[in-house]
Image (tube, helix red, strand yellow):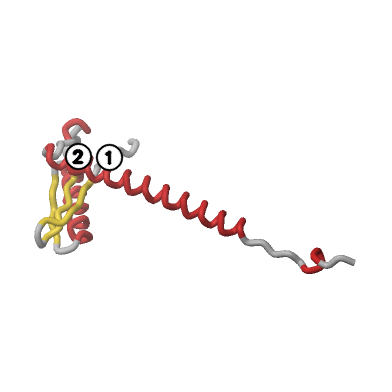
């Protein structure tokens, strides 16, 4: 029997004093005092859910349960913000490289032997 691979997307964010972690594919939610704690609890919840589903021999279509649309929208927003940040970082890196190149090319050394005439 070949292994099954199930894909999941997760978001985690702070709400008030707690962190929430949400599984978008399995509609599970966990909370914690830290983001790591929330993600660890969600991971455990997803594994428990999948163990039950696999022991019942459920089909993949029956395992996946979409989270509410508000979480899907939050995921899309996080992806958009991340893409903008990556683009900005790439532009800054390129700008820094150009700046370094300009500084490097503006520096010259001239051996005095070339400046002295015999």
Q: Which mark is residue 7?
A: 1
Which residue is rendered at x = 18% and y = 63% of the image?
A: 34
Residue 16 in percent (x, y) is at: 9, 59
- Residue 80 occupies quadrant: top left
Q: Number of numbered discs present? A: 2
User: Which quarter of the figure is the N terminus placed in?
Assistant: top left
Question: Circle 1 — which element?
Answer: loop
38 or 50, which lies in front?
38
Residue 70 in percent (x, y) is at: 12, 40
Of all residues, the one furthest to the front in this rendering is 117
- Residue 37 occupies quadrant: bottom left
- Residue 63 occupies quadrant: top left
Assess whether mark 2 and mark 1 are in contact (beta carbons under 8 angstroms): yes
Residue 86 in percent (x, y) is at: 36, 47
Which residue is rendered at x = 19% and y = 39% of the image?
A: 25
- Above/below status of 91 relative to 16: above
Query: Whole-Å distance between the Cαs marked 1 and 2?
Result: 8 Å
Q: Residues within 10 Å of mark 1 (few under 14, many from 20)?
A: few
Residue 52 in percent (x, y) is at: 16, 44
Whether residue 95 sits left or right of residue 26 in the image: it is: right
Which residue is rendered at x = 20% and y = 52% of the image?
A: 12
Which residue is rendered at x = 27% and y = 40% of the image?
A: 7
Whether residue 107 sits left or right of residue 90 in the image: it is: right
Question: Circle 2 — which element?
Answer: loop
User: Which quarter of the figure is the C terminus placed in?
Assistant: bottom right
- Above/below status of 65 relative to 106: above
Tell me which numbered mark, 1 or 2, is placed earlier along the sequence.
1
Whether residue 64 sits left or right of residue 86 in the image: it is: left
Q: Which mark is residue 25?
A: 2
């Amino acid at each position: 029997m070949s292994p099954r691979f199930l894909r999941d997307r997760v978001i985690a964010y702070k709400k008030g004093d707690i962190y929430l972690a949400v599984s978008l594919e399995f509609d599970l939610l966990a909370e914690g005092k830290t983001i790591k704690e929330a993600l660890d609890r969600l991971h455990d919840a997803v594994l428990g859910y999948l163990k039950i589903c696999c022991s019942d021999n459920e089909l993949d279509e029956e395992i996946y349960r979409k989270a509410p649309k508000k979480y899907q929208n939050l995921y899309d927003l996080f992806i958009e913000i991340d893409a903008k940040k990556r683009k900005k970082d790439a532009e800054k890196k390129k700008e820094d490289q150009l700046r370094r190149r300009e500084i490097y090319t503006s520096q010259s050394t001239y051996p005095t032997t070339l400046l002295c005439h015999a």
